[in-house]
Amino acid sequence: MARVVPRPEMTLAEKAYIPEILRGMRVTWSHFLKGFNEPETLPVQSYPEVQWEIDRNYRAKHRLMKRPDGEPRCVACFMCSTACPARCIHIEATESDDPRIEKKPAKFDIDLLVCVFCGLCAEACPVDAIRMDTKVIALAADTRGKFVATKEQLLDWNPADYPASDTQSQKAPGGLLNAEARARWAQGDAT
Ligand code: SF4
Ligand code: SF4
């Protein structure tokens, strides 16, 4: 059954519109002037000078994890590129020099303009070789080609930018656990 919505009767001032417009303008101007007099009270952030704090779990630009000797952890198994719904990961495999490892990537490119940042590549990787925890979310370039992240770029990260509790990152060259991990790696520990 239809419900009758009661419509309140407008006063003479409301029917004239002008007083209501002036009332609305008073609110607008009070906010406008407050912004000039007390800018620190405005709910805005002076981006890009002040960056937002990005959570480590946020799916940002990718990085390739490194072994203690600096080589990529990636074993070129193609599981990430197979799982990728955007088909934007391009890998070329080659034989590894290390007898403990069968393959390594000769080429590992991600087209960040095509990527939909779904995170399935990081989920699919069986050896924790690709992550999206760089906190880099502002991607800018002047040509399309510069949006293709190469293997060298994906490997270019510093363990100091990652927490001490992130043991996999700290085992990489320059990390807090690198010396110990390197020694174990030399003794044959391939984890
Ligand atoms: S985040 Fe998703 S779309 Fe981007 S490379 Fe990984 S799997 Fe592909
Ligand atoms: S990043 Fe991981 S899933 Fe992708 S090819 Fe390398 S080892 Fe395989």
Image (cartoon, rainbow, N blue to C red):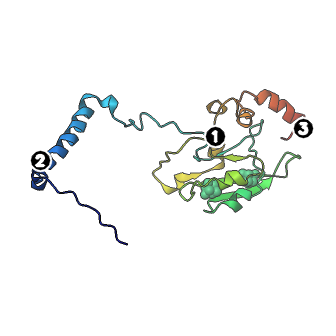
Q: Please report whichever mark, 1 or 2, sits nearer to the chain's N-terminal start.
A: 2
Residue drawn at x 19%, y 46% as measured from the top left: 24
Residue sitting at the far front: 1
Query: Measured along the vertical axis of the image, is residue 173 above or below residue 22?
Result: above
Residue drawn at x 62%, y 50% as measured from the top left: 150
**Is residue 35 among the parts visible in the rendering?**
yes
- Image coordinates for residue 162, horizontal then vertical, percent: 64, 33
Q: Quadrant of residue 159?
A: top right
Type of amino acid under label 1: Asp
Identify the secondary structure beneath mark 3.
loop
Query: Residue 156, which numbered label?
Result: 1
Residue drawn at x 79%, y 27% as measured from the top left: 179
Quarter the C terminus occupies = top right
Residue drawn at x 66%, y 43% as measured from the top left: 155
Query: Measured along the vertical axis of the image, is residue 89 above or below residue 152?
Result: below
Q: Out of 95 and 170, give the one closest to the viewer.
A: 170
Type of amino acid under label 2: Pro
- Image coordinates for residue 54, horizontal then vertical, percent: 54, 39
Q: Out of 25 and 166, give the one closest to the viewer.
A: 25
Residue sitting at the far bottom: 1
Q: Name the residue tied to disc 3.
A: 188
Q: Of circles 1 and 2, which is in front?
A: 2
Q: Out of 102 and 59, give the one closest to the viewer.
A: 59
Q: CA distance from mark 1 to mark 3?
A: 25 Å
Type of amino acid under label 3: Gly
- Count residues near mark 3 (Cα–Cα under 10 Å), then give few for <14, some for 14-19, many for 20+: few
Q: Name the residue tied to disc 2.
A: 19
Q: Quadrant of residue 71?
A: top right
- Count residues near mark 1 (Cα–Cα under 10 Å), then give few for <14, some for 14-19, many for 20+: few
